[in-house]
Image (cartoon, coloured by chain):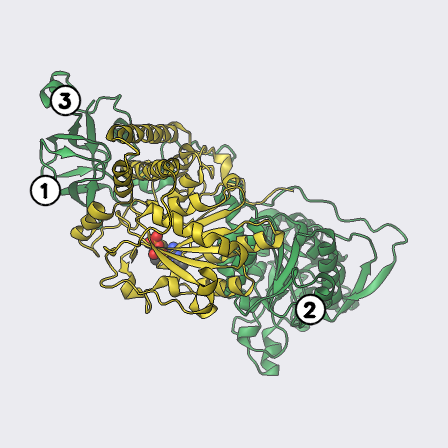
Chain colours: A yellow, B green
């Protein structure tokens, strides 16, 4: 299907209606349901992100976390679905400043992430990067980038390295629909296709770039078509449905490894403000409530598990309890950790030697 | 166990908030993520969401009331708990063992929280405040390479020296590759990469589209992954489109990642005025890049230094900016014919010894300084010429040693005077050789104007021999 997509322009209908709300139409989940174990992993990861972010919000309120802090609540299915479809041994992941969720699903210890948010020496960047600049090379996670769109050429460079070394890996490069208007994104698209680099561009269309809805910032809101000028195929998926994201990603990955770039637009939604200081005046409470009530990625997965008889309410409650404990432990670890010693001011400017 | 809800900090600058509305009432169940109240901050009205579940037991701050960040505003009871019980236990205020919320009150004052640097826990720096601002050098400096006696010297243009440096490093390390506009099939816009495509093929000599921002970002990504890209800019003028990746991505990521992410990349190309190409194609970027911690910056003058420093740059585990010069590409110098000629980054060179005045310069303008020294010698002024070679990390010691010998200094650079390299050296002279100075440092710089096109004006906009000679006489009190 993908090879065909590269030739002909796909005829896929743009979603009807107001693009500032999540479409009520669900992309039909392509393919089969992943095995029960996989679904439980999705649930655990999405819950971990949700509870972690809630806790981060709370710690921000207490003055323990400061600066810019962008929460991922509402978008959990995107990072979870995509990362689970990757080959974690060889594939690389990169994203923007809204990066806590991606890191957690890549397997970084929540303690290290929370400690970084709190600016402690035990954090994954020794407290010197903060919320927006976190990295975990052991888990092939390359950040954490604060300049809107910067991770797109950098991620394309990671894909360049995969191809240069012929290691069979690909780069999953996440960016927002706001970032999708950046010039450097198109420079990267052009070279990615020109050199057939193994890069999966995942546009997390959460409908708003800070306070600007997609429709007020872009002349062509079908973001999955943004590669057409470069002959890069694309598709969209319901980013509130982790199974759909996972299956779609799995479907396109062989194409990316063999043929080159692909653009996956995940239509999602962020429940919280852009960052912690966002008054959220650009959208109604009803709009947010509608998505929360009817499209929540975690609720939908819970329902699916219950409907199939794969989980009981009690089991789900137990998982929630476990995750809460992990998150509380992370928060405690962060708060109990010391700040970086003053000498750390001067380290890591250069690689010595 | 009850939980005390405290006034949250909802923005980096908030110190106090007003309860605009309680969305939940006393006795209401609260789920994590549910909005409990609307709070007016210094910026806007923001929703306050619950993190824990429970029953809203008691509202401590009524609608319209205000509280400072961290002050209790309500009490959340656990399922089955009652307020009476709580009061009986005398625990209306948060019990100290309620975990996180208890710490809320112990949290730093909101103003301190906003300026996260000033948290009470911060230990005072141990080192005494340095007299001069500390500049991070990045490791110990390797010694100047020896040229064994009998080493043949070959005449070579700077262009050939740069090409040989790249070719040798590419032969030595399969992770080194070259990318840029016209570097491959065309052989380089200034013919620096001639022959490399033929030897190394398209996999390692990569012609890019004219998209500096994009290909620089790609180079940085490849370097993050451990490759060693050489990114050529057709000229540094065009790298302004890419300076975001050079500074924000290449220079800062090691620090922001706590030492995890290395960026072993070389950015190179011709810098400064060529001839008659006017303002947009003639800018000199030394002070721009030398300003940035995380970058190393080299500006070779001779072919030997061009070769040795470029090889060092390619091997360096840090991002290195190599500022070349189109006028120099065609000039020939003697280069030692050695298997592996590498010049350490961070070391200046005494290009000519003298005892009356120190002339400091770098890149193309070392030539002018030497010319001036020659002319000055005829009038009995022995000028010492210091070729900086590296701007970051700056070899302060060599400059200061020369200054202590001559007691006066003239700096020659092509860049604009404001915040330039000469300004930095004047500060250095004051900081480290104040008592040795017999005259104020004089700067000969490019004129503080965009580069003009007309031949006569262009000449006037660049450092001139007569200026250098006059300045030397002045600081030696010989005029
Ligand atoms: C180059 C640049 N311009 C502006 C900003 C400030 N900024 C940070 S996030 C943001 C909105 C980005 O929205 P989007 O790409 O949709 O991602 P989201 O925040 O929704 O995840 C802006 C304007 C920035 N960080 N970098």
Foreground pick, A335 / B449: A335
Quadrant position of residue A49: top left
Q: Is mark 3 on a helix, strand or loop?
A: loop
Residue A272 shows which numbered tag? none
Q: In which quarter of the image is the N terminus of chain B?
A: top left
Q: Nearer the viewer, mark 3 or mark 2?
A: 3
Q: Which residue is located at x 17 percent, y 20 percent?
A: B91
* Residue A56 appears in view: yes
Mark in the foreground, 3 or 1: 3
Q: Which of marks 3 and 1 is nearer the N terminus?
A: 1
Dot 1: within a 10 Å radius of its alpha carbon, few (fewer than 14), some, or many (20 or more) residues?
few
Residue placed under numbered mark 3 in the picture: B81
Looking at the image, can residue A97 be seen?
no
| Picture layout, residue A23 above or below residue B128 | below
Q: Decide: marks 1, 2 in contact (CB < 8 A)? A: no
Query: Which one is in front in this view, the residue at disc 1 or the one at disc 2?
Result: 1
Residue displayed at 36% across by 62% down: A223
Pick the residue in front: A36 or A272: A36
Q: Position of residue B471 (x, y in %)?
A: 65, 66
As helix, strand or loop, the secondary structure at mark 2 comes to: helix
**Disc 1 designates what residue?**
B64
* Chain letter for mark 2: B
C-alpha gap between disc 3 and disc 1: 28 Å
- SS under mark 1: loop
Relative image position of residue B53 (x, y in whole percent):
20, 31
Query: Horizontal and vertical percent for residue B387?
Result: 70, 58
Chain letter behind tag 3: B
Q: Do the residues labelled 3 and 1 touch (CB within 8 Å)?
A: no
CA neighbours of label 2 inside 10 A, class few (<14), some (14 to 19), many (20+): some
Q: Mark 2 points at which residue?
A: B469
The CA span between labels 1 and 2 is 75 Å
């Amino acid at each position: 299907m993908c090879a065909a997509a590269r030739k002909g322009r796909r005829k896929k209908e743009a979603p009807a209606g107001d693009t500032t709300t999540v479409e009520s139409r669900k992309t039909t989940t392509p393919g089969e349901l992943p095995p029960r174990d996989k679904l439980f992993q999705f649930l655990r990861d999405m819950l971990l992100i949700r509870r972690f972010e809630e806790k981060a919000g709370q710690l921000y309120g207490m003055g323990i976390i400061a600066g810019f802090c962008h929460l991922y609540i509402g978008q959990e299915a995107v990072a979870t679905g995509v990362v689970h479809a990757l080959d974690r041994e060889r594939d690389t992941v990169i994203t923007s400043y809204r990066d806590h969720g991606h890191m957690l699903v890549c397997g970084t210890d929540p303690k290290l992430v929370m400690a970084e948010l709190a600016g402690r020496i035990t954090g994954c960047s020794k407290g010197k990067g903060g919320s927006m600049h976190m990295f975990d090379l052991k888990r092939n996670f390359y950040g954490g980038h604060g300049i809107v769109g910067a991770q797109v050429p950098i991620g394309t460079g990671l894909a360049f390295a995969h191809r240069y070394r012929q290691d069979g890996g690909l780069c999953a490069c996440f960016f927002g629909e706001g970032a999708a208007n950046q010039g450097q994104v198109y420079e990267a698209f052009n070279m990615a296709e020109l050199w057939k680099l193994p890069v999966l561009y995942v546009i997390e269309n959460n409908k708003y770039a800070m306070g600007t809805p997609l429709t007020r910032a872009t002349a062509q809101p079908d973001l999955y078509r943004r590669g057409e000028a470069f002959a890069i195929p694309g598709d969209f998926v319901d980013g509130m449905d982790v199974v759909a994201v996972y299956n779609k990603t799995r479907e396109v990955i062989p194409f990316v490894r063999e043929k080159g770039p692909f653009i996956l637009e995940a239509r999602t939604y962020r429940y919280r403000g852009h960052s912690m200081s966002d008054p959220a005046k650009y959208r109604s409470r009803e709009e947010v409530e509608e998505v929360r009530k009817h499209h929540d990625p975690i609720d939908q997965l819970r329902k699916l598990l219950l409907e199939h008889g794969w989980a009981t309410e009690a089991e789900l409650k137990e998982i929630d309890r476990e995750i809460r404990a992990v998150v509380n432990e992370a928060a405690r670890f962060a708060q109990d950790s010391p700040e970086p010693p003053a000498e750390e001011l001067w380290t890591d400017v250069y690689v010595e030697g | 166990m009850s939980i005390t809800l405290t006034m949250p900090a909802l923005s980096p600058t908030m110190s106090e908030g007003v309860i605009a509305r309680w969305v939940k009432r006393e006795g209401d169940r609260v789920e994590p993520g549910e909005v409990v109240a609307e709070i007016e901050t210094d910026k806007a009205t923001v929703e306050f969401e619950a993190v824990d579940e429970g029953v809203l037991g008691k509202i401590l701050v009524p609608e319209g009331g205000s509280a400072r960040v961290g002050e209790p505003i309500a009490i959340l009871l656990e399922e089955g708990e009652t307020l009476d019980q709580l009061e009986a236990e005398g625990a209306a205020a948060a019990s100290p063992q309620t975990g996180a919320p208890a710490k809320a009150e112990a949290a730093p004052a909101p103003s301190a929280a906003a300026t996260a640097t000033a948290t009470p826990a911060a230990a005072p720096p141990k080192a005494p405040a340095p007299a001069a601002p500390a500049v991070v050098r990045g490791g110990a400096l390797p010694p100047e390479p020896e040229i064994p006696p009998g080493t043949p010297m070959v005449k070579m243009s700077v262009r050939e020296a740069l090409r040989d440096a790249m070719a040798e490093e590419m032969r030595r390390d399969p992770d080194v590759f070259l990318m840029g506009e016209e570097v491959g099939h065309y052989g380089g816009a200034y013919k620096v990469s001639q022959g490399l495509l033929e030897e190394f093929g398209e996999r390692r000599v990569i012609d890019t589209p004219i998209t500096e921002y994009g290909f620089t970002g790609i180079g940085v990504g490849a370097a993050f992954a451990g490759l060693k890209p050489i990114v050529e800019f057709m000229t540094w003028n065009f790298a302004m489109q890419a300076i975001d990746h050079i500074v924000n991505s290449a220079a800062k990521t090691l620090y922001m990642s706590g030492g995890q992410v290395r960026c072993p990349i070389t950015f190179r190309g011709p810098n400064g005025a060529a001839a008659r190409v006017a303002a947009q194609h003639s800018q000199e970027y030394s002070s721009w890049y030398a300003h940035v911690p995380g970058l190393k910056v080299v500006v070779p003058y001779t072919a030997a230094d061009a070769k040795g420093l470029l090889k060092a740059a390619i091997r360096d585990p840090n991002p290195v900016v190599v500022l070349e010069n189109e006028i120099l590409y065609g000039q020939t110098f003697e280069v030692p014919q050695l298997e592996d000629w590498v010049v350490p980054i961070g070391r200046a060179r005494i290009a000519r010894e003298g005892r009356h005045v120190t002339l400091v310069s770098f890149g193309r303008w070392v030539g002018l300084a030497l010319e001036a020294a020659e002319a000055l010698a005829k009038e009995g002024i022995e000028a010492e010429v210091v070729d900086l070679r590296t701007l970051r990390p700056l070899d302060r010691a060599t400059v200061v040693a020369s200054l202590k010998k001559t007691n006066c200094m003239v700096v020659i650079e092509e860049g604009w005077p404001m915040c330039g390299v000469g300004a930095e050296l004047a500060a250095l002279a004051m900081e480290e050789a104040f008592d040795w100075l017999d005259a104020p440092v004089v700067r000969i710089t490019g004129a503080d104007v965009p580069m003009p096109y007309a031949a006569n004006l262009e000449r006037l906009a660049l450092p001139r021999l007569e200026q250098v000679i006059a300045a030397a006489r002045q600081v030696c009190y010989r005029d």
